[in-house]
């Protein structure tokens, strides 16, 4: 008899070699599984994540599930127990007991990624692990205009890096926002989509930055989508600026459904 727990986790990805367990590498999955092994006095528990963030990518709202084999622990106590055993670059924020048919990846209805870009001329040592860096003048209005062409259902093959194993690359983009934070001199990109392909957000950010800089026409997105050709967009933004912000397990709220406008 096991109990399935669904938990929301935040982590600083700088010192992790991504989410997924890898031999001889420090990963988020491996670190959580090691803590659970201690809690159960040596039992191996597999942790499933809603997405496999890459090395250097952060999360504010990653979601995991696992089947706990021992006596059921109340959710609040489970959070306390795990947080007491984890390093300071990981923290559990929410926990609930769910049915055994819940799957953290297959039950998801959408994901929200946020990307930060610093426009400072030189790399700020206090931002370097948490923003991308683009020291060029950009036109925010052009990027906002171009971002609208990403909304709706498309084949995003052109924005998927090689190495991904998913064959069907059709996704629905519900929401895109591009905003300038004048105080921090940063651009914040938000993307809410039914699902994301390998490096998709980082490629989208790089493409929008090229448009903002004038290296691409503002109406280039539809053409790139139609080509289904990764060679059309070769740049990929740095991992450091990317955050998995939220995972939706109900339908994406109407206020984020710009695809219907």
Image (cartoon, rainbow, N blue to C red):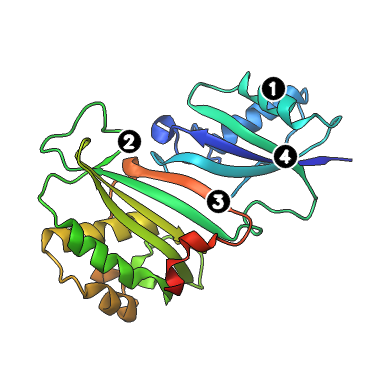
Q: Which sits earlier in the primary sequence, circle 1 or circle 2?
A: 1
Residue drawn at the location 12% of the way across and 35% of the way down: 122
Please say if the residues under marks 4 and 2 sit with CB atoms less than 8 Å apart.
Answer: no
Q: Earlier in the sequence, mark 2 or mark 3?
A: 2
Q: Depth check: 15 or 81 in front?
A: 81
Q: Which mark is residue 81?
A: 1
User: Which residue is disc 2 drawn over?
Assistant: 130
From the viewer's perspective, is 64 left or right of 167?
right
Q: Is residue 21 above or below residue 92?
A: below
Q: Is residue 235 visible?
A: no
The residue pinned by badge 4 equals 96
Q: Which mark sits nearer the N-terminus, 3 or 4? A: 4
Q: Which of the labelled discs sits on residue 247, or is there none?
A: 3
Placement of the C terminus among the 4 image quadrants: bottom left
Distance Cα–Cα, label 4 vs label 2: 29 Å
| Residue at x-position 22% and y-position 61% | 143
Mark-to-mark CA distance, 1 and 2: 28 Å
Picture coordinates of residue 2, whole percent (x, y)? 84, 40
- Badge 4 or badge 2: first in the primary sequence: 4
Query: CA separation, marks 2 and 3?
Result: 20 Å
């Amino acid at each position: 008899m096991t109990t399935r727990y669904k938990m929301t986790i935040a982590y600083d990805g700088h010192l992790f070699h991504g989410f997924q367990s890898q031999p001889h590498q420090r990963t988020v999955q491996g670190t959580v599984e090691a803590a659970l092994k201690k809690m159960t006095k040596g039992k191996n528990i597999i942790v499933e994540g809603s997405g496999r963030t890459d090395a250097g990518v952060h999360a504010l709202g990653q979601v995991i599930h696992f089947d706990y084999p021992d006596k059921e622990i109340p959710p609040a106590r489970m959070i306390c127990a795990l947080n007491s055993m984890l390093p300071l670059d990981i923290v559990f924020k929410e926990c609930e007991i769910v049915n055994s048919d819940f799957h953290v990846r297959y039950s998801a209805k959408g994901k929200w990624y946020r990307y930060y870009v610093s426009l400072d001329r030189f790399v700020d040592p206090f931002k370097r692990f948490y923003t991308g860096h683009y020291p060029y003048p950009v036109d925010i209005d052009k990027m906002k205009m171009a971002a609208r062409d990403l909304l709706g259902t498309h084949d995003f093959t052109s924005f998927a890096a090689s190495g991904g194993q998913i064959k069907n690359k059709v996704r629905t983009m519900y929401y895109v926002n591009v905003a300038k934070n004048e105080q921090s001199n940063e651009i914040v990109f938000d993307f809410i989509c039914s699902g994301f392909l390998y490096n998709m957000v980082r490629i989208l950010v790089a493409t929008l930055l090229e448009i903002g800089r004038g290296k691409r026409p503002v109406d280039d997105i539809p053409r790139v989508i139609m080509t289904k050709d990764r060679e059309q967009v070769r740049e990929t933004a740095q991992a450091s600026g990317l955050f998995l912000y939220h995972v939706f397990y109900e339908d994406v709220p109407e206020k984020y459904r710009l695809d219907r406008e």
